[in-house]
Amino acid sequence: MKSRAAVAFEAGKPLSIVELDVAPPQKGEVLVRITHTGVCHTDAFTLSGDDPEGLFPVVLGHEGAGVVEAVGEGVTSVKPGDHVIPLYTAECGQCLFCKSGKTNLCVAVRATQGKGVMPDGTTRFSYNGKPVYHYMGCSTFSEYTVVAEVSLARINPNANPEQVCLLGCGVTTGLGAVKNTARVQEGDSVAVFGLGGIGLAVIQGAQMAKAGRIIAIDTNPAKFELAKAFGATDFVNPKDHDRPIQQVIVEMTGWGVDHSFECIGNVGVMRAAIECSHRGWGQSIIIGVAGAGQEISTRPFQLVTGRTWKGTAFGGVKGRSELPGMVEDAMAGKIQLAPFVTHTRSLTDINEAFDLMHEGKSIRTVVRY
Ligand code: NAD
Ligand code: AHE
Ligand code: ZN
C-alpha cells in the first residue's frame, strides 16, 4: 500500500514528504495507522548524524499513537481497530530481561531494531523500489507503519491521541525516571538539567512524588515558566554564573541534592549533575543521549564518597504492562499531558517541528496526519 511519510534521506538534511510503499505485516507484525506523533530530541539527534545506530534513508519518529489496521500471522494480542502506542522498548514477557523483574530492557527485537529492520532482517518500507529503514521499532513519521506485536501497547480508545502519543516517549521517560530509576521519596531534593519534554516530565514526576526542593536548570530562561507550573521551586540559568554549575547547586543546598537528572545529552552537564549530588547518598540519573564518541568522566572520588551514577531508558517502564494504566491516569487528570503540547503541525510541515525545537520555542510539537 501507499503511505504519506516524512523520510530522512540523508543526515543533516530536512525530511522529505513522499509517498512510500508499505508491505503487508508479516508473522508477528502489525500494520498501524499513525494518527499523531510527537517529535523528540532523539529524532533530531539521529537526523543530525551523531547516532552510532543512525541509518539512512529512514522513517524516523518514535512517539506516536494510532490504530491497528491489519495484523500478520499469529498476532493475537491486538486486532484491527484497537488503539495503540508503538513502543521503542518492546515487552515480550519471555526473554531473560523481561523475566528478571529487574529491567524494562527487553531484547526480543532489539538487535534487528538497531539495524533498522524488522525481526526477519528486511524492511517493510520502500521508495522507488529501494528499501527504507525502520527506526527504533516504531517509525511514526509514516501514516502507515509496521511494528512487531511485542512493540505495541493497547490503550483506551477514548484517550486523546494528540496528547497520549507523548506517553510513547517523553512524558513516560521523565515520570518513570523519577519513580522507577531514582525512586524519589517525599521531601527529597531534586535538580533537573534541561527543561525540554523530558526534564519537565521529571519535574512533574518529582512533584507527584512530593519531592521537597525541585531545582530547574536551563540555559534558556523561557523554559522556567512551564517548569514552575509543573512544580519547580528554584530556577537556575548557568549563563548567570561565572563558576561551575555544580558548585552553584551545592552552595544552594549545603551538600548537594538527593537526586539529579541530566535531560540534555551533554557529557559536560552529566559531570556537573553527578558532582552536584549529595555526599554520602546522592545519585544522578542520565537520561540524555550523547553523540557517537562522547564519554563521561568525573573524579572517582565522587563515587568513593557515596554518589551513584545511573541511567534510564524509557524511564524503566514496561510498555505493554504499564502504558495502558498511564493512559488511564492521563484521562483521569493524574498525569498532565496538555502543557507539553506547545505546537501542532500537519505532516507536510513536520520540519517546522525540528526548527521550533532547535530554536528553543517548543516543548513538543505534535504532528497530525
Ligand atoms: P529538548 O531539546 O526539548 O530539551 C533540552 C533542553 O536542554 C532545552 O530546554 C535546552 O535549552 C536545554 N539545554 C541545552 N544545553 C543546556 C546546558 N548546557 N545547560 C542547561 N540546559 C541546556 O530535548 P528533550 O526532547 O527533552 O530530550 C532531552 C534528552 O533526552 C535528549 O538527549 C534526548 O535524546 C534524551 N531522551 C532520552 C530518553 C531515554 O529513554 N533515555 C528518552 C527521551 C529522550
Ligand atoms: N542509538 C543510540 C542510543 C540511543 C538511546 O540511548 N536511546 C534511548 C531512548 S531515547 C528516546 O528518545 C534508549 O532507550 N536506549 C536503550 C535502547 O535499547 O536503545 C546509540 O548510542 O547507539
Ligand atoms: Zn524520544
Image (cartoon, helix red, strand yellow):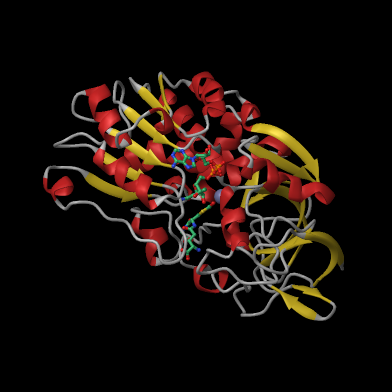
**Which quadrant holds the N terminus?**
bottom right
- Residue at 63% x, 42% y is 357
Nearer-the-camera pick, 228 or 28: 228
Q: Is residue 23 left or right of residue 246?
A: right
Nearer-the-camera pick, 17 or 172: 17
Q: Is residue 226 above or below residue 320?
A: above
Q: Is residue 86 above or below residue 109?
A: above
- Residue at 38% x, 52% y is 267
Q: Quadrant of residue 117?
A: bottom right
How many numbered circles are shown?
0
Answer whether residue 335 is visible to the viewer in this image: no
Q: At which x and y percent is residue 300? A: 16, 53
Q: Quadrant of residue 365?
A: top right
Q: Is residue 192 left or right of residue 7?
A: left
- Residue at 68% x, 41% y is 356
Answer whether residue 247 is visible to the viewer in this image: yes
Considering every residue shown, the one lying at the far front of the view is: 242
Nearer-the-camera pick, 311 or 44: 44
Q: At which x and y percent is residue 323? A: 55, 43
Q: At which x and y percent is residue 165? A: 66, 42
Q: At which x and y percent is residue 59? A: 70, 63
Q: Quadrant of residue 57?
A: bottom right
Q: Is residue 230 above or below residue 282?
A: above
